[in-house]
Image: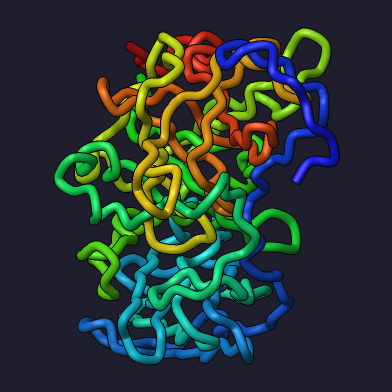
Amino acid sequence: MLSRRFALPSAAMLIFTGTALAQAPLEAGPVIAHQAETPHPYPKGNNARSRVWSDWIVSPGATFVRVHFKAFHLAAGDYVTISSPDGEQSYTYTDRGPNGDGEFWAFAVSGDTAIVELHGGPEPGHGYQVDSVGHGTAKVFPKRAKALREVVCGTEGRQDVACHLPEVDAAQKPVARLLFVSGAWQYLCTGWLVKGNTADTMLTNNHCFSTQKVVATVQATFNFQRLICGVNGNAAVSNYAGGSLLRTNSSNRKGKSGGLDYTLFTLKGSPAAQWGVLTASVTSGVVGNPIWLIQHGGGYEKQIGYWDDAAKTVRCKVNAVGATYSGTAPGSQTGYSCDTEGGSSGSPVIDAGSGKVIALHHYGAVVNDPCLNGGTTMANVCADAGALLQCQ
């Protein structure tokens, strides 16, 4: 919590000069050096693409493993699979990998072991090298564990999104969990498909990531959620790789620029066709209006901030508009008391009446009397992003 208390000038206009707590991306485990490779060229197979080489990539104690390839170059028709030992997760890669340059992060598989198998034909190619693995420490697959420190205002009011279907179904589908690599560590945030002029545009926070190098490591997981309210048992997920960085705006104001804390980027594989998009609003929220805050807090299954309290008596709502919190662009912030935690960064704050996104969540504990979390008002993001977004 914050070390000082502040008298608020009004519920609608807040000036906060203390230090807001950025809802930092959730640490998900280190990147560890690991050496493995095929012969170059790799052995011949047959026309049916038989298995010609395999590596078991083991990182003892990991909750999940991501394999990093370099010099990945297969002959036409050949392919590599990365699978968990139980076969529940399996992903296929061909040619020079999804980025077309022979270097990429494979999608995560659960547990401490990834099985890499190369299936080759009669004309072998160069093969691959593995130079590092992402050693997972977060619980990114089902079976919820205790989350990290939450920014809960009062009592915990979040619920599984299944608790509010079909009411929020169209709004929750475009929201995904983002797993990515930055430097020597893996992280988790939340992102969502937004209506834009580039296909499959996604939005998250700048403080999650802001470079093409990190965008290329993104694994966006859609539909990671429980099927029934409060009951273990998950839906089938879909994963998509990061595409291109479109635009980013820093989390802190520097001179006359920055302070909006957003990153726009694309995903590969046309996810919007299956999961739809959310529309950003050109108008600010209205104090007192109810909101939905859809998120992957803690990296866990998708939840919704619908209630402010565990008793389900107080709705999540807009508490402040036109606010300025520490480091942000003047008048660019929306305040609310919906509960969040690490990993919630980048979540959409949705006006329950219109279904449009009015803010991009990024800060926790921006004010502590009353307790408020904060997001960048989407009208400000729309103005800065210009033609990249189709705001309404």
Q: Is residue 367 left or right of residue 140?
A: right
Q: Is residue 187 left or right of residue 79?
A: right
Residue 253 lies, with reference to residue 255, above or below; the image says below
Is residue 239 visible from the viewing direction of this image?
A: yes
Across the whole image, how many numbered discs are drawn on residues? 0
Q: Position of residue 301 (x, y in %)?
A: 39, 62
Is residue 71 visible from the viewing direction of this image?
A: no
**Which residue appears at 35% of the width and 81% of the height?**
120
Q: Residue furthest left?
A: 166
| Colouring | rainbow
Q: Is residue 116 left or right of residue 4?
A: left
Residue 229 lies, with reference to residue 165, above or below; the image says below
**Which residue appears at 35% of the width and 70% of the height?**
92
Q: Nearer the viewer, residue 22 or 134?
A: 22
Q: Position of residue 283 (x, y in %)?
A: 41, 9
> Could you say which quadrant of the image residue 280 lies in?
top left
**Which residue appears at 29% of the width and 43% of the height?**
172
Q: Position of residue 167 (x, y in %)?
A: 18, 40
Q: Nearer the viewer, residue 174 or 367?
A: 367
> Could you say which quadrant of the image residue 160 lies in?
bottom left
Q: Position of residue 340 (x, y in %)?
A: 53, 48
> Could you say which quadrant of the image residue 392 lies in?
top left
**Which residue appears at 43% of the width and 16% of the height?**
285
